[in-house]
Amino acid sequence: MPKNSKVTQREHSSEHVTESVADLLAHEEAVDYKRSILNVTGETWDKQKDGEEDLDAENRPAWNSKLQYILAQIGYSVGLGNVWRFPYLCQKNGGGAYLVPYLVLLIIIGLPLFFLELAVGQRIRRGSIGVWNYICPRLGGIGYASCLVCFFVGLYYNVIIGWSIFYFFKSFQYPLPWSECPIVRNGSVAVVETECERSSATTYFWYRETLDISNSISESGGLNWKMTLCLLVAWSLVGLAMIKGIQSSGKVMYFSSLFPYVVLVCFLVRGLLLRGAVDGITHMFTPKLDKMLDPQVWREAATQVFFALGLGFGGVIAFSSYNKQDNNCHFDATLVSFINFFTSVLATLVVFAVLGFKANIMNEKCVVENAEKILGYLNTNVLSHDLIPPHVNFSHLTAKDYHEMYRVIMTVKEGRFKELGLDACLLEDELDKSVQGTGLAFIAFTEAMTHFPASPFWSVMFFLMLINLGLGSMIGTMSGITTPIIDTFKVRKEVFTVGSCIFAFVVGLIFVQRSGNYFVTMFDDYSATLPLTVVVILENIAVAWIYGTKKFMQELTEMLGFRPYQFYYYTWKYVSPICMAVLMTASIIQLGVSPPGYSAWIREEAAEKFLFYPTWAMAILISLIILASLPLPLVFILRQFHLVSDGSNALSVTYKKGRMMKDISNLEDNDETRFILSKVPSETPSPMPTHRSYLGPGSNSPMEMSSAPNGRYGSGYLLASTPESEL
């Protein structure tokens, strides 16, 4: 018996000691049950395999510094959605008033669930598959579902990086290729391309030069070779960044996480110097308070919070699993959550400073075009010169003068005013035109940049920023696949990373057809939203209700060195599950109310048109949702009926540098004998152990004072290692 055991100490001490068998066992040296006399399972000890597991635990990669880890989490959570989704939602849902529901939901849903994922990843030091297998084997399908969703999202997300790469290389020329409509020769006559003339130069360049898009999802049109090459470059970048795990991706994060902030600040400074920038920002943050009472606003805010932090994908857990056990993950969760929020606000300022400038340009263009119409009507005596105020000068016509003329003409010609075809040319109308996603990045923003001095420089900076934002998110998304697979199946990191990138590129060719943009829309709308919501709800339930919120809080206290606020107890146990269930219900209702469809670009009309998905596309759409959710019931059934082993019949699991041990400190009195005889205790042991020190008779540990009578929350790293003959 070890010299420091309590039995040995009791022999040399006159002090009265009262302790249970569980206490004795708690302080013995940890010996794997397979090597112990207590191994009655018939399982043989494979010394070579056990040595490999020890080596794997000891050699688990770790972040070079805390800064590298924080930048990785920021790079993962801050993505393209912060730049082109958040500003759109802010504008659509009440301007400054939208920030209130977003911030509230960030605090009661986003932060607690983000903290939860960081904590379980850091505690168990495994990817998403290993984490949920340890916490609740029957819900082990959570990890597999996360991997599938990451795969679906990674497929189309990298296509967007490919588009940005195409625009990046096209930006190295002056004037920018999307600044003017192309001229085509019709015999000896040069005319403007009809499709471009009926839309705009930037719209034409996006739909025709970049995507060469077909009229519907049913018209494949073959591969777009330019986009195929760009997709190959995008997957090559991701593969190179991921090939050495966090040793390579961590270094990439120094640039890909910080560079977007440099660009955003430069754009903000440049944007504020543009004429009309203040109009855009003022319009953006003018609160429409009535919108705060709209349930749809809260649903969209909750969805944005959910996806902005990358919850449920497994990337957060993967990155956190490379941390030291005593890392303050609560600080990390708070810091990253609010950096994400402030990045969204910064991007919103930039977007609407630039869009305010663009609105002024378009408004001036509208005034000039309509002033020419009025001059024509004056010259043909359709309108009388008496209707024009004497101070109006058509050679230097201001928006204010035009609006004055417009009101006079509308009043006098009330009956026939519509026949004149005059527009009001209101700045607010231009600012109210909602644009998001590709429409914002590749049409509205590119059009605004054509009016910048030194426009190629700003275009290069903008698309390099999009590439870095996308790359940071893709590294996190791919880590959500590679980390759990490598941890679980022990495959070679380099081989699996290269193989998965090649496979993803081949499957991703569906997105670089001429109809590929429609598939990107389908995957973006339906492949992740509902399955991820279910995944996060089950994560919350697994920790808060199956494992136990009190036990989890106590183990966080042991890991962090301080007890997290009670706020987390109530949000994990009640608030977050209820809010997520409401969000899931609202998402299902939304799917039922809004028939699945997409915006198609009709070449002949040079305009977008909403089309419904054909039957075969609906089958793909439904299959995506089912396939991403399938691991959840499948793993539950297989383990519930013992069709596959979940490891729960093992008496113990070693805890050494990341491996877990069964907790026996909460044994009832009548369970102790059963434990000595290698029987299963009456209560399912904890997969995430804590430590309790013996303080002597009459002493109370802080954990014992606040826990159940049998030390339920004061458990130690316990192992059945001492034969009966030694007691």
Image (cartoon, rainbow, N blue to C red):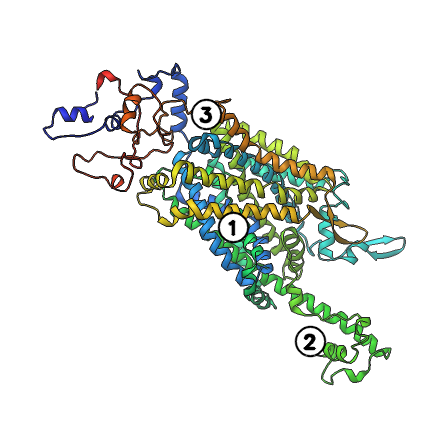
Could you say which is closer to the camera, residue 470 or residue 82?
82
Quarter of image, res 114:
top left
Label ID, residue 82: none
Which residue is pictured at 28% across the width and 42% down the height?
706
Quarter of image, res 274:
bottom right
Q: Distance between the residues labelled 2 and 3?
A: 75 Å
Q: Among all residues in the image, which is located at the extreme front?
A: 670
Q: Residue at label 1? A: 305
Q: Residues within 10 Å of mark 1 (few under 14, many from 20)?
A: many
Could you say which is closer to the camera, residue 496 or residue 34?
34
Label ID, residue 398: 2
The nearer-to-camera label among 2 and 1 is 1
**Mark closer to the chain start, 1 or 3:** 1
Residue type beneath disc 3: Asp
Q: What element carries label 1?
A: helix
Left or right of residue 359, residue 645 in this image: left
Residue type beneath disc 2: Thr
Provide residue 158's location: percent of width, then percent of height: 61, 41
Is any atom of residue 397 visible in this view?
Answer: no
Say if mark 1 contacts mark 3, CB within 8 Å.
Answer: no
Label ID, residue 646: 3
Provide residue 584's location: percent of width, then percent of height: 55, 45
Say if mark 2 contacts mark 1, CB within 8 Å.
Answer: no
The nearer-to-camera label among 1 and 3 is 3
Q: Compared with residue 278, is residue 613 higher up or lower down, i.e. above or below?
A: above
Which residue is pictured at 30% across the width and 29% down the height?
667
